[in-house]
Image (tube, grey):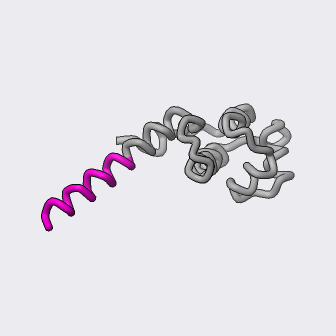
Amino acid sequence: MATVTSIVPLTKSAQPSALKSIRKPFGVTQKVFAEYMGVALRTYEDLESGRRATRPFHVMAAKGAALRLAIDLSRLDALPGDVQTVAIRLANEVATRAWRASALK
């Protein structure tokens, strides 16, 4: 089972490039990605440029934003590998439970 620590190691700070590497495959602007993350554009710019320390919760928020973008843009392929794995596992689990529920009727 994937845990929070297997998705984002609990270190004091992450590389600013982590956020950019999550955003870039979607081809969206910093403004759009900041909106999906739920942070102000200036905050996002400061995080991505390294002017503000990127913490594990920023990376988790970016991965959550990436998941929502993947759904909205139909771009599962753009998800970071660890998030893609979790999303596929979740989809399989939901499908299995739905199939079991329908088989019981």
The stretch of residues the image draws in magenta is 90-105
Q: Nearer the viewer, residue 46 or 92?
A: 92
State the residue at coordinates (60%, 53%).
72
* Apparent side of residue 89 relative to residue 60 in the rendered image (left or right): left
- Left or right, 51 with respect to 12, comes to right
In the rendered view, would you say 103 is above or below 24?
A: below
Image quarter of the N terminus: top left
> Is residue 95 shown to the viewer in this render?
yes
Question: Between 67 and 2, which is closer to the camera in this rendering?
Answer: 67
Residue occupying the far left of the picture:
104
Confirm whether residue 14 shows in the render. Answer: no
Residue, x 69% and y 55% (percent of image)?
A: 36
Quarter of the image with the C terminus in it: bottom left
* x, y percent for residue 46: 84, 44
**Predominant secondary structure, magenta span:** helix
| Residue 27 vs residue 22, the one in the foreground | 27
**Residue 95 located left or right of residue 29:** left
Q: Nearer the viewer, residue 91 or 47?
A: 91
Residue 12 included in the magenta stretch of the image: no
The x, y position of residue 66, in whole percent, is 61, 46
Direction bottom: furthest residue: 105
Does the magenta segment cover residue 102? yes
